[in-house]
Amino acid sequence: MPDLLIELFSEEIPARMQTRAGEDLKKRITDGLVEAGLTYASAAALTTPRRLTLAVEGLLAESPTTREERKGPKVGAPDKAIEGFLRGAGLTRDQLEERETPKGAVYFATIEKAGRPAAEIVAEVLEATIRNFPWPKSMRWGSGGLRWVRPLHSILCILTDEAGAQVVPMEIDGIKTGDTTEGHRFMAPGRFAVSSFEDYAAKLKRAFVVLSPAERAEHIWNDAQNLAFAAGLEVVDDKGLLAEVAGLVEWPVVLMGQIDDEFLELPPEVLQTSMKEHQKFFSVKNPKTGRIERFITVANRETTDNGATILAGNQKVLSARLADAKFFWENDLRVAKSDIAQWTRALENVTFHNKLGTQAERIDRIAALARELASVTGADADQAEKAARLAKADLSSEMVYEFPELQGLMGRYYIEAAGEDAAVAAVAEDHYSPLGPSDDVPTAPLSVTVALADKLDTLTGFWAIDEKPTGSKDPFALRRAALGAIRLVLENGLDLKLEQVIRLGFAAHCYRNTTLEIKDRLEQDRHIAEALKIDAKRVDQIRAELTEMCRLDEPGARAKVESLFAETGLTGEELSQFRRIVPIQQFMYDVFGLTDLLSFFHDRLKTFLRNEGIRHDIIDACIAMEGSDDLNLLVKRARALNAVIATEDGENLVQGFKRANNILTQAEEKDGVEYSYGADIKFAETDSEKALFGALEAAQAKIDLALKAEDFPAAMSAMAALRGPVDAFFEDVQVNTDNDILRRNRLNLLSQIRQVCSSVADLSRIEG
């Protein structure tokens, strides 16, 4: 069995594209080979900045011969039908076979496909792969039509077996396959031939190319740590930067440089970000002080002066970059110490979203919502509002303008410099969290309050303007915001009624949009406004009333709306015109969006709990219960139900419940009555029937006490204890007996089973 080696040699491939490109090359080549009948033992893709390499071991020398039998039309069928079958099979009529079947004589065709040499198949698959390679960005060069991420120089493609290496012949846009490659651009220029993967890897190493990205990364990290340790320092861990730098060099040479003393007092995050983003340098810190004092850079070649010239050039460029950062830092500090509120005022001119207003308006909404949430999170309301108003101030700072990834973190420095409490300053950094499933969740009451308000304002705002996630599209990261809010509630154990908070969020957006709508209509219909004597003061009154309406339930809101219209004393056409000026839709976001947004939260919760092994149907059974907007109670109930259903008693009880529910539902549909008036034990005939009466009464009492104490495991255990009495009842008793009195009594008893179990969870939603 031969081994296959492919190398696509080009100009430098961007580091961020290399890993995915290697995976795509492996998948497309191996999938194509297998589809053509060539199986293999193993395959591995390797990348450097200038090459994509694929090594396939144990490839079949040729594809196997295949035989396929196809059933055709009946004997005597029209000629056109038979000719069509022959064209599809690639045969002539004399090659068909007649066979008798239960439906009469039928033509059958046996199609035999001879195997093909591996080289022929590899050439076809490789050409298709190169021509259709899924680069995120690609280019054409010269006069050819081939597109590649950077100009493609050569294609190495050989099959190696005991007899030696064979070049797989292929040409694409003037580039012919061969058995040669190049080493390092500067340290080993020139081409050389290879005969196998082992020969290829060894010769590349001698030509100063480390083929494996993992090996390059390990070499960089080990050398960096050794250099730092020798100076009594340590390298700041950054796996993302390490992977990127390993994709920038073929022969890594690690060097450590000095940061000028004038920059050492900059915040470590500023130094680290500036060096990483602009220079791809690793930061080296003093473990005793936490101060960044040096940097690690990785060159792509060895030099006679051991990298001194490279370091000097890097330090010169770095000093210029850090001088800018120092300038931003000092300017920002002056503003923060004198009047940090001017940054917030500047956000009045920064649009958050054209339908949701400016960043300053958003801050007002978050501050108001944070004040409302303070009682739930245990934060001081005044402090929560202050923290919310300062949390995004750094968006106007020069440092964050230059390095957006430092937003929040710089806010903490600036707010502390302004003389505010450390807890208030910490909110600026914490309120963006959690950003992802592995991100830490804030625990400080002020940070939790503002983080939750921020995410809820985002969700209610985009729901209010009907910009919801659709399919895989989520341009405003609303799924992430919902999951973040869920984690904030659950991991901090907040006793939060989500429906009430969502209404508050909608109210804030209703306030803004209704006001704009009224003003716009008054401008358009000035003569109506004048005729109705609607002045600016009345507009403010209407606005305040509409805002309050959003806190009410749907019937209450509608009633208040009608009351507002009646207050005008208008009738007929005039009232119709007034309704047009103050359209009802604008302040009914809570009516239209509340249920949908709650469902969105519940869907995100299902995703979150899936990692705990809790099925969607179990969560649905709990969501159907009252109080499902209390996420903590909902999760406690779901975990308890999941634990009970995992037991034999729980599983069997669900089956018993479903049996009772099915019999009862069918009887109610047939009889046209509802059996929910309570069964009487005096009509019980069997011991098991009498026992079920007692078991249901005892279970209901225990369940009621447990639910009142929010002890869901106890409630579920009490429900699971019904398994035995319910099983015994169904074994001994015929529900649909000929005796109408007994039948009705037993159906009412089934209704009690349904009622008792349904007080814990809606078991009808459990699958299986």
Image: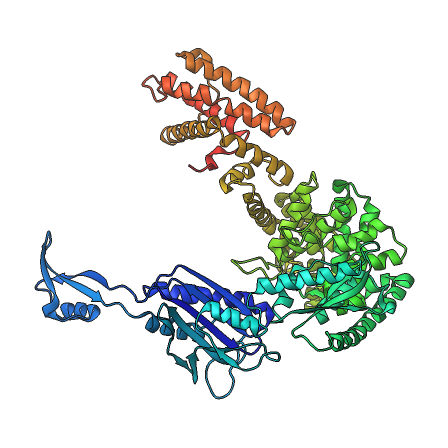
| Residue 703 at x, y percent in the picture | 58, 24
The answer to whether residue 548 is visible is: yes
Query: Which quadrant of the view contains residue 556?
Result: top right
Extreme-right residue of the structure: 338
| Residue 83 at x, y percent in the picture | 15, 71
Q: Nearer the viewer, residue 539 or 768?
A: 768
Quadrant of image for the C terminus: top left
Query: In the shown orientation, is residue 534 left or right of residue 68?
Result: right
Tally of numbered tags: 0
Query: In the shown orientation, is residue 177 left or right of residue 369?
Result: left
Q: Is residue 75 above or below residue 316?
A: above
Q: Nearer the viewer, residue 405 or 285?
A: 285
Query: Which quadrant of the view contains residue 170?
Result: bottom left
The answer to whether residue 569 is visible is: no
- The residue that appears at 36% across and 73% down in the rendered structure is 124
Q: Nearer the viewer, residue 56 or 149?
A: 56
Instruction: State the colouring used for the structure image.
Output: rainbow
Q: Nearer the viewer, residue 647 or 635?
A: 647
| Residue 189 at x, y percent in the picture | 57, 81
Quadrant of image for the N terminus: bottom left
| Residue 135 at x, y percent in the picture | 51, 72
Query: In the shown orientation, is residue 762 left or right of residue 435?
Result: left
